[in-house]
Each structure stands twice: as C-alpha cells, then as structure tokens.
Amino acid sequence: MPKILLVEDNEMNRDMLSRRLIRRGYDIVLAADGEEGIATAVAERPDLILMDISLPGIDGLQATQRLKANTATRSIPVIALTAHALTTDRERAMVAGFDEYDTKPIDLPRLLGKIEALLGQQGPAS
C-alpha cells in the first residue's frame, strides 16, 4: 500500500482528505507545517507528498525546495495543494520543484488521477 505524506496546517482539511485517501487504500502520514513535513518525509520516506503551499513558518515552496535538495528525499514526487489558482502561482510551484499542482477545494477524482499518474504501478489495488 503506497504511503502518502499529507502536509496541511488546517486540521479540518487534513482530517477530511486523509480519511478519503485511507478509504481509497493509501497509508497516510500527517504533518501540520513545513518543518514537520520535512522531518516526516526524511523519517518515513513516503511514496508521494501532498504539500499545502500556505503553511506557517516554512511554507510549502520552501519545504519542497529543501526536500528536492536532499538526496534522501529528492525523488519523492510532491503535489502542491493550494487555494491560489493563478497561472503565476502554478509556475512558482513548479520552479520550486513540485511535480504536480492541484487547487483547493479538492476535487478528489482529479487529485486521485494525479496521484496515480505519479505513483505509476504503486497505486492501490482496485
């Protein structure tokens, strides 16, 4: 079962999305801010990271840059989750090292498609 790290500071969003992903067969680990997200990614080595961009302290852009600069975590795909939907926001995320970008509110079928595309053969068994 693929492991996904969800880095989200909003408790309600974190709870809702994690429950929906668990029901789809994913193993979920959680972090509430950028620092915790980096530490959890290093310790847990998830198969994929869902990273909110607007986080307290180190934001999602900075956290992803650090993860992509670390040889231990650079190959983990990271999807940006954000309420910012401008083209320039997407471009900033991609420059920071994100592998994919998705907007809030979360459209679960669309997000699942992106997760499955990045995980390839590792997606949960249907």
Image: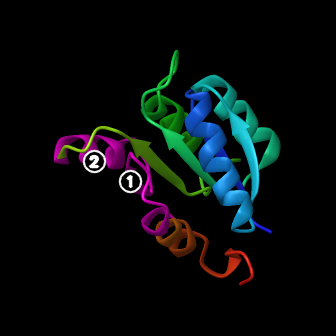
Residue lying furthest top? 57
In the rendered structure, find residue 56 and report the number of the disc placed on it: none
- Could you tell me if the residues under marks 2 and 1 are in contact, i.e. CB atoms within 8 Å? yes
Residue range in magenta is: 87-111
Q: Is residue 99 visible?
A: yes
Q: Secondary structure at mark 2?
A: helix
* Residue occupying image coordinates x 38% and y 45%: 104
x and y percentages locating residue 3 in the rendered image: 75, 58
Query: Is residue 123 on the magenta stretch?
Result: no
**Residue at 55% across, 38% down:** 13
Please give the residue where the numbered disc 2 appears in the rendered image: 90
Q: Which residue is mark 1?
A: 101
Is 6 positioned to the left or the right of 98 in the image? right
What amino acid is at disc 1? Tyr
Q: Nearer the viewer, residue 59 or 104?
A: 104
Looking at the rendered image, the quarter that the C terminus falls into is: bottom right
Which quarter shows the N terminus? bottom right
Q: In the figure, residue 69 lies in which quadrant?
A: top right
Q: CA distance from mark 2 to mark 1?
A: 7 Å
Q: Which three-letter amino acid code belongs to the residue tagged 2?
A: Arg
Q: Where 22 sits versus 104, above or below? A: below
Q: How many C-alpha atoms fall within 10 Å of the one at disc 2: few (<14), some, or many (≥20)? A: some
Residue 91 at x, y percent in the picture: 25, 47
Mark 2 vs 1, N-terminal side: 2
